[in-house]
């Protein structure tokens, strides 16, 4: 557990294999003004982790920000039956075994909106992601929209693969397959990106890879420079 600022923590979990790479997992927990906990991209829930979480406050919201971040939701739902679960429409369709309370695609008055802003990043036919911004700490929270692997636990060929995909630190960005899928709707994606820039984040939390704690705006502009290419 690492406390990044007042009322925001990250927890690193075990790696899972995806596209031949060991994808590290990371969860973000925010304590809202009323004391409730908002849990983004839940990782494997061990007894030790549950003890840490319970010391922070009551778990109220479980967030699956895209259709790839859902593996451990059933554990959390079982452990915190009073929590409400939210995901994008894609993950709701994919996990019909989970009862979601609402879709992040909907335009609703979210109960956390005084503390956390959000934007659904669309334009790809293959994946969409809801990104979040913790207002008080000026922290942007993403999962796969940006990946920035250190490569420390990669074999040589895995580093080569990650560099080719554009997801190796310090030059991490949206993976190349997802970037290519925006080919026909880059203007739509640029509108979402402009809203993210307007938040003026100072810290970027990614589910996969190194955090950005300095010069976040410059990193963002470089990371999304592909949106300006024809």
Image (spheres, helix red, strand yellow):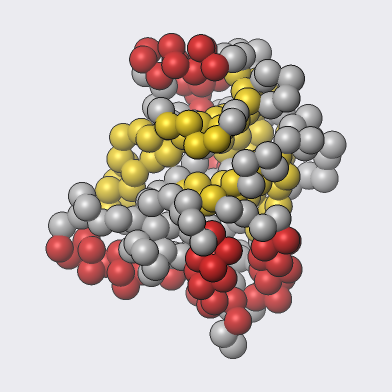
- Looking at the rendering, which quadrant does residue 192 occupy? bottom right
Q: Is residue 143 visible?
A: no
Q: Position of residue 204 (x, y in %)?
A: 52, 51
Q: Is residue 31 above or below residue 143?
A: above
Figure quadrant of the N terminus: top left
26 lies above or below 159: above
Measuring 43% from the left and 12% from the top, which residue is drawn there?
51
Residue 202 in the image: x percent, y percent?
58, 53
| Residue beneath the point at 25% across and 56% down | 151
Of the pair 137 and 205, the residue shown nearer to us: 137
Foreground of the two, 182 or 40: 40
Question: Residue 77, relative to residue 23: is it above or below?
Answer: above
Q: Position of residue 48 (x, y in %)?
A: 36, 15
- Residue 121 left/right relative to 25: right
Left or right: where 186 falls relative to 79: right
Q: Position of residue 221 (x, y in %)?
A: 56, 71
- Residue in front for this viewpoint, 127 or 169: 169
List the single residue furthest toward the left. 156
Q: Residue at x 51, y 12 (%)?
A: 55
The image quadrant where one finds the C terminus is: bottom right
Quadrant housing residue 158? bottom left
């Amino acid at each position: 557990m690492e406390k990044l600022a007042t009322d925001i923590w990250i927890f690193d979990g075990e790696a899972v294999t995806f596209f031949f790479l060991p994808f590290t997992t990371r969860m973000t927990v925010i304590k809202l003004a009323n004391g409730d906990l908002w849990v983004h991209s839940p990782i494997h829930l061990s007894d030790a982790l549950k003890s840490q979480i319970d010391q922070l406050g009551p778990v109220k919201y479980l967030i699956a920000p895209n259709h790839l971040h859902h593996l451990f939701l059933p554990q959390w739902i079982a452990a915190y039956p009073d929590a409400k679960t939210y995901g994008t429409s894609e993950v709701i369709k994919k996990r019909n075994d989970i009862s979601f309370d609402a879709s992040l695609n909907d335009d609703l008055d979210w109960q956390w909106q005084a503390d956390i802003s959000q934007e659904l990043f669309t334009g790809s036919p293959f994946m969409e992601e809801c990104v979040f911004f913790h207002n008080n700490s000026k922290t942007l929270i993403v999962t796969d929209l940006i990946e920035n692997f250190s490569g420390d636990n990669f074999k040589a060929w895995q580093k080569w693969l990650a560099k080719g995909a554009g997801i190796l630190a310090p030059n991490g960005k949206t993976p190349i397959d997802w970037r290519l899928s925006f080919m026909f709707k880059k203007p739509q994606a640029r509108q979402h990106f402009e809203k993210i820039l307007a938040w003026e984040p100072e810290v970027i939390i990614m589910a996969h890879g190194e955090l950005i704690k300095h010069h976040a705006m410059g990193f963002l502009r470089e990371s999304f420079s592909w949106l300006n290419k024809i």
